[in-house]
Amino acid sequence: MRGRSLAAALALAFGATTLTVFVLVGSFLYIALEKQIKAQDNLDIVLAARHARRLAEELDSAQSIRDHSERLTSVVLGNEALSMEVFDPDGKRAIEHNIAGALAVPDAASGAATIAALPPLTRVAATTRITEADIGDWTSRNGAPIRGIFTDARLRNGDTASLLVARNMSDRWLLLDRYRDKLTFAGVAGVVLAMLLGYLLIRAALRPLRDIAASASLVTVNRLDTRIAVARVPSELEALVASLNAMLERVEQGFQRLSRFTADLAHDMRTPLSNMRGAAEVALARPRSVDEYETLLASSLEECDRLSRMIESVLFLARAEHPQFVKQLREFDAGQELTHIAEYFEGIADDADVRLRVSGTAAVTADLELFRRAVSNLLANAIRYTPPGGEIVLDACASADAVRVTVENPGQPIPAEHLERIFDRFYRVDPSRSSLPSAGLSQGSTGSTGLGLAIVRAIMELHGGSVHAESDARGTRFVLRFPRVR
């Protein structure tokens, strides 16, 4: 099943983020505009009410209100939304201006509008300063929203008239509704546009990933040397490309090692099989004596032992590379173990006219059987290449962070270019050495299979340590380094 598109998911996330931002910004702008309009309208209403009351206070009587109606209504002229009603001291409406929708309902009997017909409003006393807090809200007869101030005005003769200055808010609500609709349309269009542009931009930004995938698809078994080469890789993907190329390089090296190992293994296994086949064909060419047949069987048995050691070594290396390989770690004296190993090899060393000497002592934490196998492989290798009369030294010493076990033997120095590769499987400095006898090596030694030093390195890697070789005119030294367990 095809997975979800990353570009689409990011575009949707980008669109949702944009929508959230638009909603927050649009709400802020709408509320800010509403408050600004309300504040301006409140100011207009307050100023008009103050001005109207001041003009009324200059009049002498109720009749003066009617005589100077134009003077009073001039306060709201020029603004069609503003309206005014003035009531005489008897409560009857004396002046009205722009009161479509009738704020005060006329009395059914008299036909005149009175204060009693007004909705319940808070009246500001004639001696009280008019402020925005005095503004009230109500609805006219035709359903229009109204905001206004109802205040008294003291005439010069001592009578009290009443003034109602109001503003029809229908145009304001209509303006806000239109503004809200425009914000909604702009928000939806902006989100759609943001999603579309985001999708295109994200696809363009993900193009290097598609180029990396295309380059990786070119890597095959026959083209392991291919590397991912993407021009102008973003800095965020440089680490990914470098890691993939490093992985491909490790895969290539591992495949090459496996190929060489397979070829070397086939070559080394073919040699004893060819020897047994050749010896058997010679023996069957004509009748042989019992002694000759026994010699043939003994030779075939030696070749079988060599094959068995080779197979056992290969299986050990395969198990050692498995992450679940079990080690039985324990602390022991490396000097004592070197002495035991030297005693075990004493007979083989005597046959080769080689002396063994053990020195030093150190406590090491390791798998005892693997420790013995690693040192035995090194010692068998040293005996094989030590000239008669030579002395092999096994030494153990401790430092602050590691225990070093050294096997040193005299002989021809190993060229520097071979020192690192001698731990590779089936690698030999001198191919002719593969035909040397195993000198009766014990089980666990690899004889001349070419796997002994590879096993030593595998054992040291299992312990988190290392092995290296040093060679000069004085001789060759193999050094095992076991880290201290804290």
Image (cartoon, grey):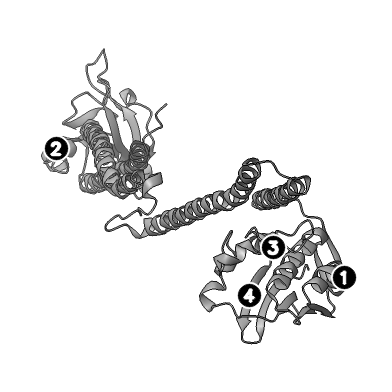
- Direction bottom: furthest residue: 474
- Check disc 2 and give the amino acid type: Ser
Q: Return the disc, 1 or 2, that comes first in the chain's sequence.
A: 2
Q: Secondary structure at mark 1?
A: helix
Mark 3–mark 4 Cα distance, whole angstroms, equals 23 Å
Mark 1–mark 4 Cα distance, whole angstroms, equals 24 Å
Q: 91 or 481, which lies in front?
A: 481
Quadrant where the image shows the N terminus: top left
- Check disc 4 and give the amino acid type: Ala
What label sits on residue 469 in the rendered view? 4
- Check disc 3 and give the amino acid type: Pro
Report which residue position mark 2 lands on: 69
Residue at image position (47%, 57%) is 253
Mark 1–mark 3 Cα distance, whole angstroms, equals 21 Å
What label sits on residue 343 in the rendered view? 1
- Badge 3 crowding class, 10 Å Cα cut-off, few under 14, some 14 to 19, many 20 or more, is few
Mark 4–mark 2 Cα distance, whole angstroms, equals 119 Å
Q: Are marks 1 and 4 in contact (CB under 8 Å)?
A: no
Q: Are marks 4 and 2 in contact (CB under 8 Å)?
A: no
Report which residue position mark 3 lands on: 437
Instruction: Give the mark toward the camera: 4 or 2.
Output: 4
Q: 263 or 217, which lies in front?
A: 263
Q: 234 or 473, which lies in front?
A: 473
- Above or below residue 250? Residue 40 is above
Residue 121: x percent and y percent? 37, 32
Instruction: Give the mark toward the camera: 1 or 3.
Output: 3
